[in-house]
Image (tube, rainbow, N blue to C red):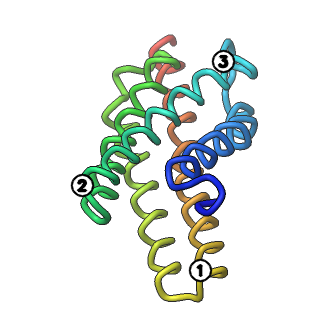
Amino acid sequence: MYHNLGVMGSYLAWTVLFIVLAGAVFGSLVVGRWRLPKFYLLFGLAFFAYAAAWVIAYFSLGRLTGEVVGSVAGSILMAIVFAAGLGALRSTAKLSAVLFGANFIGYFLGSTLFFYLSHPSGMLLFGVVYGLFFGAGIGAVLYLAQAGVQTQNT
């Protein structure tokens, strides 16, 4: 992808792919008024906020520092969007922590696999590990945000 789309084009393509494919999966976890297709708007905004923060941090601060700062900033922005959209603003700090933990562990565990294994298999395992951890974090956040709202309403 880097060869055909360049660095920024590749990141944009991956963001769009993640929003389109993962949005359908995560949309099934949401009840009430945010069912598909409205959930795509919420998820798209949340993931785009995360991706923009991560890319800005990565390209302005460099590799490791940018990855960590991007992970923190992106997780906070994603949590704010989900919390606002699902009416769970009181849970923003908890949601941010869950997203950051899952994102950080998945990204750096995947990065380690990528570093120690050959290029094609290491890159594939990086994507699988990162996707599983970050996906689990997003799923947990969607559950927690909705559970918090249901608890407040009862």
Q: Given the image, on which type of amino acid does mark 1 rest?
A: Gly
Spot occupied by residue 133 in the image (x, y as percentages of width and height)? 54, 59
Residue under pointer 3 = 34
- Residue assigned mark 1: 122
Dot 2 amino acid type: Leu
Residue at x-position 42% and y-position 38%: 52
Label 3 – label 2 distance at C-alpha: 36 Å
Can you say which quadrant of the picture contains the N terminus?
bottom right
Q: Position of residue 32 (x, y in %)?
A: 69, 15
Q: CA distance from mark 1 to mark 3?
A: 37 Å
- Label pair 1/3, CB-CB below 8 angstroms: no
Q: Is residue 31 left or right of residue 91?
A: right
Picture disc at residue 107: none
| Front position in the image: 13 or 121 | 13
Question: Mark 2 falls on what kind of element?
Answer: helix
Q: Nearer the viewer, mark 1 or mark 3?
A: 1
Q: Nearer the viewer, mark 3 or mark 2?
A: 2
> Of label 1 and label 3, which has the lower sequence position?
3
Answer with the quarter of the image where residue 142 lies: top right
